[in-house]
Amino acid sequence: MELSIIPKPVKINYAEGVFSSKEKPSLIKKEVKIHEDGMIDTSAAQDGYRLIISKDNITAQAPSPAGIHNAEETFRQLLLSNYNDGCLTLPCAEIIDYPRFSWRGFMLDCSRYFYSVSFIKKLLDLLSLHHINRFHWHLTDDQGWRLPVKEYPLLTEIGSRRLDNRFPFPTYTEGFYTEEEIKSVVEYASSRYIEVIPEVDLPGHASAILASYPGLGCSGGPYRVEDRFGIFEDALCAGNDQIFDMIEKIFDTLVNLFPSKWVHIGGDEVLFNRWQNCPKCQKKLKELNLEKINELQSWITYRLAQMLKERGKTAVGWDEVLEDSPKFKLPKDTVIMSWRGSEAGLKAAKLGHKVIMSPNTEGCYLDYKHSPEAEEIGRTLGTASVFDTYSMKAAPENISKEDASNILGGHCTLFSEVIYAGKIAEYMLFPRLCALAEAVWTPENNKDFEDFSKRLIVHRKRLDSLDVNQYRGKLK
């Protein structure tokens, strides 16, 4: 009898005998320093644990509360699959486990589709089960603004509502999270040792902002909260200093609601046509003595990073923010989330930035179809099989030790353009989220996709018992 656990532990040492109980046993917890048996002394190792199954009891040892929690979640997996007919039976064993990376993340886009708080909490439970410890909450985009900002009430009054063009008659979709709901999500996540990182996308993907406050755009409108998907030309006007008044209040709101030291500022897919033809933007370009219009984004990114630093926060940006200007260099403490492949992440690591790998070319975009069959749901921008996700390498083998030290870990994302319900989201996430969890937890030389596939058979039954919808097609 072998223990089936996802993500795969660093080591399982089996012993003679069996633990058997007709009741669900309590886990004995001991917070102790653990350095022997290969448990390295790093920030990642603080999430590690030792789970000892003897004939008489089950004990969790760990150097931190987070490690104890991860041991509990591994134990929960064993309960879900091995507690049958009123009896728990497990082989005696010692599980020694710790993560490869300290950052093991998942992003949920709640702008294009507004997911309920109850669904988000269900996902947090599932993230915790798989030792995922970062929840990246994508709260704003062209298709909806979900964050309450007291000083700018139209952001939610207007910016949270858009036409739903799936229907032949006028139908609207809307919603935003109250302060109380956001705090409840943050607290729920924190109790599971998951850090919630909010994202407010700036200065592009701003249709919902501009529909609410048209004076912050280059043309003054008219604007609308977008019911289409894609990249749009309108962005916040770089020549209008009032955008920073609004951003100040947005950041103050984030500081109040989110204890995380990180705030994601977006920065992706900004188009510069409006700035090129805007007298205020051209004036600002001359004032700052800049040559190219795209350098205005570097200036904005620099200011946003400084504003967050003043509030004790660190900026995270999509990899476009690396495209800085000579005058406004990207602050060294800005964290880069590499999404257009891994090259930008490797470049950022060489430049000394901390990096989170989330390459859309390596199975990290879970809104992509599982396979190319016409019947499969998902975006048609590409496919991402379970094998692709499992094979993602946050730190390639040929990277230098110094550069590798700048890679915090890996991240997967679910953008919700075509994901119109929680059950569809679950189908897109599982079992690829299981694969990602192993890709960023388990040592590279301990990974084995065939072995993962066998363990997944048992793990699927656990997910079924938790009422999780799953993709059940080919894994490769």
Image (cartoon, grey):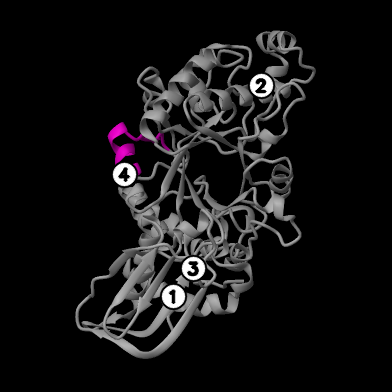
Q: Decide if residue 122 is on the left or right side of residue 297.
A: left
Name the residue tied to disc 2. Answer: 299
Name the residue tied to disc 4. Answer: 187
Check the picture and name the quadrant holding the C terminus. Answer: bottom right
Q: Residue furthest right?
A: 291
- Relative height, residue 132 to residue 443 (above, below): above
Q: Nearer the viewer, residue 218 or 413?
A: 413
Name the residue tied to disc 3. Answer: 7
Q: Decide if residue 278 is on the left or right side of residue 158.
A: right
Q: Secondary structure at mark 3?
A: loop
> Disc 3 or 4, which lies upstream in sequence?
3
Distance, label 3 to label 2, CA atoms, is 42 Å
Q: Residues within 10 Å of mark 2 (few under 14, many from 20)?
A: many
Please indicate, yes or no, whether residue 191 appears anywhere in the rendered image.
yes
- The amino acid pointed to by label 1 is Ile
Name the residue tied to disc 1. Answer: 95
Distance, label 2 to label 4, CA atoms, is 35 Å
Q: Quadrant of residue 241?
A: top right
Name the front one of labels 1 and 3. 1
Q: Position of residue 268 (x, y in %)?
A: 63, 35
- The amino acid pointed to by label 2 is Trp
Q: Within the magenta stretch, is there residue 179?
A: yes
